[in-house]
């Protein structure tokens, strides 16, 4: 699928750059010879070169000449766009499906045979019973390697991992708010260590491929930050909303604060005054018809347009590209060698 995503997105990019809609405002037609009658002829016009023009310094975009797109070309472009979006969605959803079973194991710290919580460090070894997070890293690396080997445009790679990390955020955060056994101090330490592995992965993948994926984990990061902070009963409501968990809603904060329990040191949650303030604000929100849902929704939309793809890819200079020998042996493609 990565191979087809790479090829269809590149073809869509070339089609976008070599054609414009009829009557588009602000477009000045460049001086050029009469366009060929066939669509393939228009697409390959930029590959033709002659000795007289070989020494002219022309920008890459001038190699692929713009033509006025007619209905067949516009229909083909529309169908090609649908193919790119469909293939993108399949790759993204397959990655989510592979991560789903792993995430269900990563939300709660495993326990030893004696029933105590397994304390995890900065990273997880391959032989550790806490290697579910490492399996997620391996899954991400496998997909990234496949996309890179097939030269999938980096903008699409970024979108895939950004939406995948958003999915991770939704699954972990919702599980935290729905399961009281997950809202513990030791579990917060376990998830925090796993998030550190994801942060390291983003740094190693670099912004070129990871994009803003790390920022998509804000909800679970801030929720875990609350779970592992000490002396919660001394924290005021303003400190929670402004410093500790600014992105979380009142409903989400109330849920975490009331579910929290310390399975290690038996410490208390926030003070009754903070809980009271949250209840007052939730009552006001309900009177103002503000949604009382504390769960997050996964976004499965297509996060890019044809223009986004066209602007992000770099135009290549095709003037020195040599046609494949198989094409030159076919009389129908002799024009490529002219």
Image: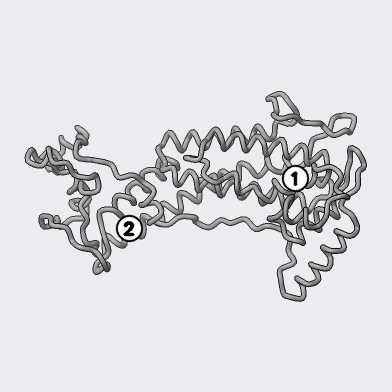
Q: Quadrant of the C terminus?
A: top left
Task: Name the side, left or right, on which 270 lies relative to 210.
Answer: right
**Whether residue 23 is situated above or below residue 264 in the rendered picture:** below
Q: Which residue is mark 2?
A: 77
Q: Residue at x 50, y 40 (%)?
A: 207
Q: Nearer the viewer, residue 257 or 35?
A: 257
Relative side of 72 to 78, left or right: left
Q: Which residue is mark 1?
A: 224
Per the image, label 1 sits on a secondary structure element best described as helix
Q: Residue at x 75, y 66 (%)?
A: 292
Q: Position of residue 119 (x, y in %)?
A: 81, 31
The quarter of the displayed image where residue 189 is located: top right
| Mark 2 Cα shell of 10 Å, populated few (<14), some (14-19), many (≥20) | many
User: Rounded to the nearest whole Å, what is the CA distance between mark 2 and mark 1?
Assistant: 46 Å
- Where residue 191 sits, quadrant-wise, is top right
The count of marks equals 2
Q: Nearer the viewer, mark 2 or mark 1?
A: 1
Location of residue 125 (image quadrant): top right
Q: Residue 80: x and y, percent?
A: 36, 55
- Residue 251 in the image: x percent, y percent? 77, 61
Q: Which type of secondary structure does the marked residue at label 2 adopt? A: helix
Q: In x, y percent, where is residue 115?
A: 89, 33
For marks 2 and 1, the one nearer the N-term is 2
Estimate how packed mark 1 is, as few (under 14), some (14 to 19) or many (20 or more) residues with alpha carbons within 10 Å: many
């Amino acid at each position: 699928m990565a191979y087809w995503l790479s090829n269809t997105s590149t073809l869509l990019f070339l089609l976008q750059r070599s054609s414009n809609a009829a009557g588009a405002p602000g477009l000045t037609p460049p001086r050029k010879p009469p366009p060929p009658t066939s669509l393939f002829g228009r697409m390959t016009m930029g590959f033709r070169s002659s000795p007289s023009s070989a020494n002219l310094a022309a920008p890459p975009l001038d190699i692929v000449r713009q033509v006025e797109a007619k209905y067949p070309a516009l229909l083909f472009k529309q169908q090609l766009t649908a193919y790119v979006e469909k293939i993108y969605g399949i790759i993204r959803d397959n990655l989510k499906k592979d991560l789903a079973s792993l995430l269900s194991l990563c939300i709660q710290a495993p326990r030893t045979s004696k029933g105590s919580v397994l304390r995890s460090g900065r990273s997880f070894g391959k032989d550790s019973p806490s290697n579910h997070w490492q399996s997620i890293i391996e899954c991400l690396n496998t997909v990234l390697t496949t996309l890179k080997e097939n030269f999938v445009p980096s903008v699409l790679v970024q979108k895939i991992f950004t939406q995948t990390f958003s999915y991770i955020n939704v699954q972990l955060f919702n599980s935290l708010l729905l399961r009281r056994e997950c809202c513990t101090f030791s579990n917060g330490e376990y998830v925090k260590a796993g998030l550190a592995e994801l942060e390291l992965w983003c740094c190693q993948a670099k912004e070129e491929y990871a994009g803003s994926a790390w920022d998509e984990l804000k909800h679970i990061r801030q929720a875990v930050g609350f779970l592992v902070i000490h002396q919660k009963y001394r924290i005021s409501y303003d400190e929670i909303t402004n410093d500790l968990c600014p992105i979380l809603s009142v409903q989400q904060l109330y849920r975490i604060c009331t579910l929290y329990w310390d399975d290690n040191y038996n410490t208390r949650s926030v003070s009754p005054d903070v809980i009271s303030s949250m209840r007052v604000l939730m009552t006001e929100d309900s009177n103002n018809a503000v949604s009382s849902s504390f769960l997050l929704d996964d976004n499965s939309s297509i996060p890019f347009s044809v223009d986004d793809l066209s602007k992000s890819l770099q135009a290549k200079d095709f003037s020195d590209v040599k046609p494949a020998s198989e094409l030159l042996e076919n009389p129908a493609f002799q024009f490529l060698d002219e």
